[in-house]
Amino acid sequence: MAEHDLVIRGGNVVDGTGAPARTADVAVDDGVITAVGGVEGTGARELDADGLLVTPGWVDIHTHYDGQVTWDPEMTPSSWHGVTTVVMGNCGVGFAPVRKGQEAFLIELMEGVEDIPGTALHEGIRWEWETFAEYLDALEGTPRVLDVAAQVPHAAVRAYVMGERAHEEATRDDVDAMAAVVETAMRAGAVGFTTSRTILHSSKHGLVPGTTAPLDELYALADAVGAAGHGVIEIIDDAFAAGGNHDQLVELATRAGTVTYSLAQAGFAPEAYLAALQHADDDAAAGRAIVPQVSNRPTGMLFGLQSSLHPFTTHPTYRAMASRPLAERVARLRDPEVRAALLAEEPATRNRIAVSLMQRWDQIFPLGDDPDYEPLPSTSVAAVAAASGRTPQEVVLDWLLERDGQAFLFAPLASYVDGDHEAIRTMITHPGTVLGLSDGGAHCGLICDASMPTYQLTHWVRDRSRGERLSLEQAVHLQTGRTAGVYGLHDRGTLAVGKRADVNLIDLDALRLHPPEMVFDLPADGRRLVQRVDGYVATVVSGQPTFENGVPTGARPGRLVRA
Ligand SMILES: [Zn+2]
């Protein structure tokens, strides 16, 4: 008779606390870790971890699986990358609460802000809820491969309470009603409340409802979170990233408990992130939980003939062929006459932000078959054009046509001002920050950063050559114990007796990110960028292997996490 349900035998255990790695066995019973060390008894199932890393499952706190979670039990691509817990509902957008008749509005918002195909959301979501508590109940009723935790989004709350007036200023009564909705949602088990303060997030209806809400409204909703006694406020914001508005963050944290906000190195204020980190030091000293949320590589757009944007997207010659199949476009773009016509044109749009994004020639790089997210400045479009006597447009066109038109170019949006990852290293190793911003499940046409947890090991522990790397122990801690801790998920994130048995067995030498690819597997044949990976030998959720060597086992032990 076996003494344990599962024993993971003889791995290099990196336990998520930051403690030194050690060779040990891990025993699991009833989904919980019951021993870490030398385990004498046998397991009904044994996994041989000799030569492998054994880590806690990754906890990704910044995703947008709010729709996909209702139809896809496999939760890809995050599940491929060893993620065992995702937090959804970020950036103020989501699908609950919702009144009958408002479903399309929330879908349009998600489509506009997070670039998730509306047709996929329309076909995929079954809308078995109205209140946030009912949404949680619906999630609870569906088994899946990983655990999910949900946050209540400001825009949905506004639409629920204010209906058609969701974009307008709220009355006192509106604010009281919203606060009641938020408090009820938090008490039902939401792990946070989220809001958008960025002018970059909008839909055809305008900015995300709540973006310009006066502070009184934000503070009232923070009080509602505080009254529930748990939870995080997540804010996606331009001004905070530039180091401003710290007093407001202090006020929100005082009322609610924990606040996390997006931080990156902005091109328009390249030193501002240092001021934000200084604030984080001050906050830690004062005992305030204000946590800048940072990413381990630049949030990067992927330009390509299959993605939503590239430098020729608005050129008349390209527009005329834009809806044609990829192979046909590639053939036409290789035609010397078509090529000459295209290269003689300018972007045909008045949207200056779009034009400047498409033509930052010093910030566009080939991503490559072995994706390089820290490319040398000498490999940019601008540098290669100058060195080879071609125009930037000629260089970009050639690159877009590589791999039969399936190549992607990497165009960092932020945190690549200096042409390396030193600013990022400063941010992710700061003791007051938390890793996030992967946007798993979102930005399907332009960004694929759900692989960030894998990158934490491939780049930051193993491959980085252009600056310091992280220790294995620190890198793992940042993606497990630290992320779980900020969200109060104290039952997971470390490998210790009594914790949930969410575990990765990783062959670090074999760990490899594939190039991103466009697939058409969402409901209604919706497209999305995904990124495959090799090297996860097994992922275990609640004691059950969910993936072995990249293949789903069929086990679906993942559940809803209620705060
Ligand atoms: Zn987001």
Image: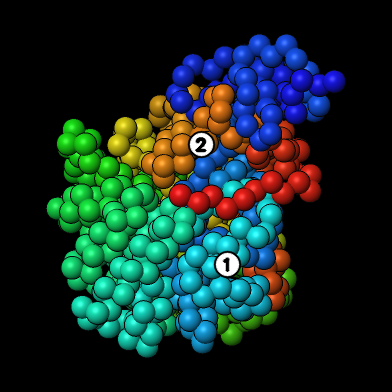
Q: Position of residue 388 (x, y in %)?
A: 48, 52
Disc 1 residue: CB within 8 Å of ligand 1 = no
In the image, 38 versus 291, the foreground residue is 38
Residue ID at (35%, 62%): 183
Q: Amino acid at mark 1?
A: Gly
Which structural element holds mark 2? loop
Q: Position of residue 328 (x, y in %)?
A: 71, 75
Q: Position of residue 359 (x, y in %)?
A: 40, 65
Q: Position of residue 208 (x, y in %)?
A: 36, 74
In the image, 554 versus 500, the foreground residue is 500
Is residue 366 at all visible to an observer of this figure?
no
Mark 1 or 2: the one toward you:
2
In the image, 461 versus 540, the foreground residue is 540
Say which label, 1 or 2, has the lower sequence index: 1
Is residue 467 at all visible to an observer of this figure?
yes
Q: CA distance from mark 1 to mark 2?
A: 26 Å
Say which quarter of the image contains residue 203: bottom left
Residue ID at (28%, 48%): 257
Tally of numbered discs: 2
Q: Amino acid at mark 2?
A: Asp
Q: Which residue is tagged 1?
A: 67
Q: Is residue 20 above or below residue 255?
A: above
Q: Which residue is tagged 2?
A: 491
Q: Is residue 379 above or below residue 313?
A: above
